[in-house]
Image: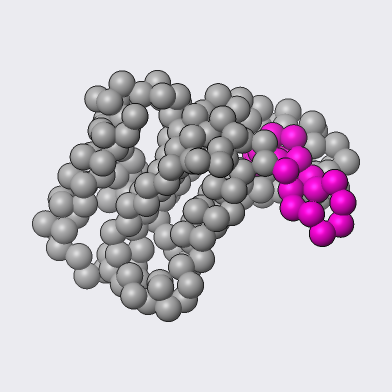
Amino acid sequence: MRTLVVHCHPNPESFNTALYRTAVQALQRAHHELRLLDLYAEGFDPVMTREERVAYLSNPGLLEARVQPHVDALRWAEHMVFVYPTWWYGPPAVLKGWFERVWLPGVTFRPALAKGQRAIPAMQHVRRLTVVTTSGSPWWWLRVMGDPGRRLFTRGLRSLFAARCKTTWLQLHDMNNVTERDCERFLAKVARTLEKLK
């Protein structure tokens, strides 16, 4: 399977980066064809300029040319894997900016044809979505808050993918209170789960 792995964490020595490495190694053992995007490591600029915003619908090709390698990776992928920490109930700003600058009209969707209609999905080639994340909050508090980060991926992004897209969600909660053993178990769970994905 053609798998795009997107990682977003500023610290290369973090537990989140260990999760990223574990995910990549597990996918390699499962013989996935991989492309890797480490947004912080490559210095991805998440800020949409005024010029880009003005051109967003009228001339999306302008933006596409500026992020072409990322657009090419999106069009290539059958399986998308995201590894990031949940901060303030959602992904880091760099990952959110990546969605805004790369998931463009004509790339991931086509604008609605009439008022009251939804955008037309353009990523039906993506058959699987996997998210590996951590959060400082306990699971029950995220549930109370409506779990907006999870909804962004499993409802918002997934709505652009194949109708029968399979979703795998792996999250370690309450990061400020976990033990080293908890972290080891979660790393093993990530490895086990991703090795089985075909």
* Residue depicted at x 26% and y 41%: 193
Question: Colour scheme used in the picture?
Answer: one colour
Residue 6 shows in the view: no
Give how far across and how far down residue 43 sits, in percent. 53, 39
Residue range (magenta): 102-120
Query: Residue 155's image quarter?
Result: bottom right
Apparent side of residue 42 relative to residue 84 in the rendered image (left or right): right
Along the viewing direction, whichever of 103 and 53 lies nearer the viewer: 103
Along the viewing direction, whichever of 98 and 161 lies nearer the viewer: 161
Give how far across and how far down residue 13 sits, in percent. 29, 46
* Residue depicted at x 32% and y 52%: 170
Give the dominant element type of the magenta stretch: helix, strand or loop: loop
Give how far across and how far down residue 62 sits, in percent. 80, 33
Q: Tell me if residue 45 is in the magenta stretch.
A: no
Along the viewing direction, whichever of 147 and 184 lies nearer the viewer: 147
Apparent side of residue 155 relative to residue 118 in the rendered image (left or right): left
Residue 192 shows in the view: yes
Give how far across and how far down residue 162 sits, in percent. 56, 38
* Residue depicted at x 82% and y 59%: 116
Q: Tell me if residue 111 is in the magenta stretch.
A: yes
Q: Residue furthest front?
A: 164
Along the viewing direction, whichever of 142 and 36 lies nearer the viewer: 142
